[in-house]
Image (spheres, rainbow, N blue to C red):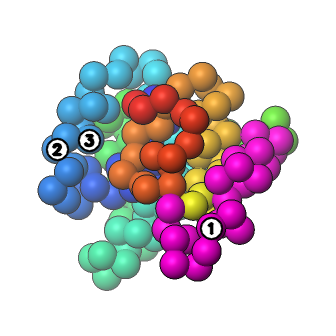
């Protein structure tokens, strides 16, 4: 399962759906839990916005969470480019009117989609746009 930044934030910040997401994460074997450095960056930035704590402190907290939860950070390579572009073409923000942009994929989402697609897995998330893709739920 690919773990999206929105899920990481929800679990660390103990948002209302964080416990449900943590349960879903725990149901996956540790060897199948992956994320990317882009999702980690988004999680750190998102938690910084929520807490106003220093980025270095948030980064340590996210790294600790990833280690404790046995989530492997997989590299993004040129092999991810075509599936990310496919995700943008099919689900990108240019597809929807401005009023519905939150239902479309941004750059990070497109690469999360590509990483999950290449790994043959679903995405653990709470993102409206990712929910509309053809990937199976995590």
| Mark linked to residue 21 | 3
| Mark linked to residue 96 | 1
Mark 2 lies on residue: 19
Give left or right: position of 44 versus 14: right
> What is the crowding at mark 1: few (fewer than 14 residues within 10 Å), some, or many (at least 20)?
few
Residue contact between numbered discs 1 and 2, judged by CB atoms under 8 Å: no
Q: Residue at x 62, y 67 (%)?
A: 96
**SS label for mark 3:** helix
| Mark linked to residue 47 | none
Between discs 1 and 3, the one toward the N terminus: 3
Residue 103 can be seen in this image: yes
Cα separation between marks 1 and 3:
28 Å
Give left or right: position of 90 versus 67: right
Residue contact between numbered discs 2 and 3, judged by CB atoms under 8 Å: yes
> What is the crowding at mark 2: few (fewer than 14 residues within 10 Å), some, or many (at least 20)?
some
Q: Residue 66 location, x and y as percent?
A: 38, 42
């Amino acid at each position: 399962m690919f773990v999206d930044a929105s899920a990481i934030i929800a679990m660390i910040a103990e948002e209302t759906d964080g416990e449900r997401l943590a349960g879903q994460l725990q149901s996956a074997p540790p060897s199948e839990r992956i994320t990317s450095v882009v999702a980690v960056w988004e999680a750190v930035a998102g938690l910084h916005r929520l807490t106003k704590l220093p980025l270095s402190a948030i980064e340590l907290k996210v790294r600790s969470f990833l280690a404790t939860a046995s989530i492997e950070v997989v590299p993004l390579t040129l092999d991810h480019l075509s599936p990310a572009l496919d995700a943008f073409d099919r689900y990108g923000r240019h597809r929807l009117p401005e009023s519905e942009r939150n239902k479309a994929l941004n750059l990070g989402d497109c690469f999360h989609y590509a990483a999950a697609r290449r790994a043959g897995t679903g995405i653990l998330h709470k993102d409206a746009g990712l929910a509309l893709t053809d990937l199976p739920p995590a």
